[in-house]
Amino acid sequence: MTRFHRWISAILLPLTLAACATAAAPRDSLDAIARDYVRLQLAIGEKEEGYIDAYYGPDELKSEGKALGAASSLPQLASKVDALQARLAAAAAAEPRRTAFLQAQLTAARTRLRMLGGEKLSFEEEAVGLFAVRPELKPLTAYDPVLARIDNLVPGQGPLWQRVDAFQDRFTIPKERLKPAFDAAIAECRTRTMRHMTLPPTETFAMAFVTGKSWSGYNYYQGDFASKIEINTDLPIRISRAVDLGCHEGYPGHHVLNVLLEQRLVRGRGWIEHSVQPLFSPQSIISEGSANYGIDLAFPGPEKLAYEVRALYPLAGLPVADAARYDALLTALRDLGGARFTIAREFLEGRVPEAEAVALTQKYQLVSEARARQSIAFTKQYRTYVINYGLGRDMVQADVDSHGPDQAAKWRRMEQILSEPTLPSDLRAR
């Protein structure tokens, strides 16, 4: 071999070896990133009780996530989120919606870690960081005309909240009749949903009544198409809540969403990231929004009142004489929903103390002091999560309604929203 050939070989051989090594190195895949995402979310869950709303993936990932959480500080977990986002940005985007979903969820995780580390965010910053939406809140005075309208519905003496609360108490379900009323309501919600959606034949749920909670109902998804639905009985439950909670927690609400995600994404496509559900993430505005809108979808127009009068009032042993007026009141009260978010912002940002927040809740939500305290307790525990119910519902409704007045078309769109990696940005603007 000549000196020239030796010189060329000395240059080319390292380049050839480097090329081989590069060719042999496995490309980062979305599946690998998704597994690390699940592990990382579970690790963050070790730092905050309740951060993980549901998990039904492999046991080994749960164990690994627990170990990672125990071994890592909050800054270390934040660095791991940053690294995973960088990997995701560099990976081949063969599935753009899957990639976008993971990026949005990781942004929320990074935001939550900032909060757990003691960083103070404004209400808007928190909502954008956790839920990928920017709420537009009205001043409380904007709801005064609604109060005046409701005042005409429930005339009489004393504070308006007191009159409204007393009127609504006439529609309380006796405790001994709660189970038959809820069993019937959930069954009807399921029947109406199954007319439009096909669920796995093994899907099921168990219901229990509980106390000592800041929420009125909760769905704990167990995996294998099963849910545990809990109903809080700390405060008297009124007749309208049977259908509301039956749809919201069950059909076509949280239970159906989780069943469809498990069936079509986790099992159907192997997208393991959907086996873990962090509470503070863009997933939640879709989950809560679709669950709230699902009530109107399953019982459009006057159908909810007609069903309640026909089936639930007799089960609850309640007279039906004022049922229509009660239903009209509930419709009017919905227009006060945004006031709750304004009160939450003022309270969380320290502009009003807790006692004033309770009083404002009584005035603008027209509830008793006990119900107002429960509402503020929820805000203290879950903070900006409160926007998911009203804003999420409005966003889902606007999107579904944009597909036309045909009910079948609305149900098809609803099924798409529930069974895909849907983000708030995927919904058509209001």
Image (tube, helix red, strand yellow):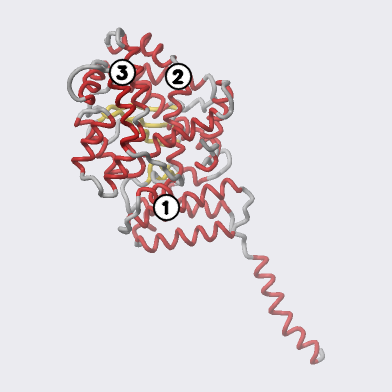
316, above or below 37, in the image: above
Amino acid under label 1?
Ala
Q: Secondary structure at mark 3?
A: loop
- Above or below, 25 against 303 in this view is below
Q: Which residue, given by chain and number where applicable, does mark 3 sit on?
A: 239
Label 2 SS = loop
Q: Residue at x 49, y 22 (%)?
A: 193
Alpha carbon separation for disc pair 1 and 2: 36 Å
* Residue at numbered disc 2: 299
For badge 2, the amino acid type reads Phe
Q: Quadrant of residue 26?
A: bottom right
Q: Quadrant of residue 176?
A: top left
Three-letter residue code for mark 3: Ile
Taking depth in this image into account, of 281 and 144 the one nearest to the observer is 144
The image position of residue 258, as x and y in percent, is 46, 35
Mark 1 closeness class: few <14, some 14–19, many ≥20 residues within 10 Å: many
Residue extending farthest bottom = 3
> Residue at 75% across / 83% down in the picture?
9
Cβ atoms at labels 3 and 1 below 8 Å apart: no
Give the residue furthest to the right.
2
Task: In this rendered view, identify the residue nearer to me: 32 or 153.
Answer: 153
Q: Which residue is depicted at the point 30% across and 42% down?
A: 344
Callout 3 environment at 10 Å: few (<14), some (14 to 19), or many (20+)?
many
Relative placement, left or right, of 35 versus 353 is: right
Pick the residue in front: 157 or 181.
157
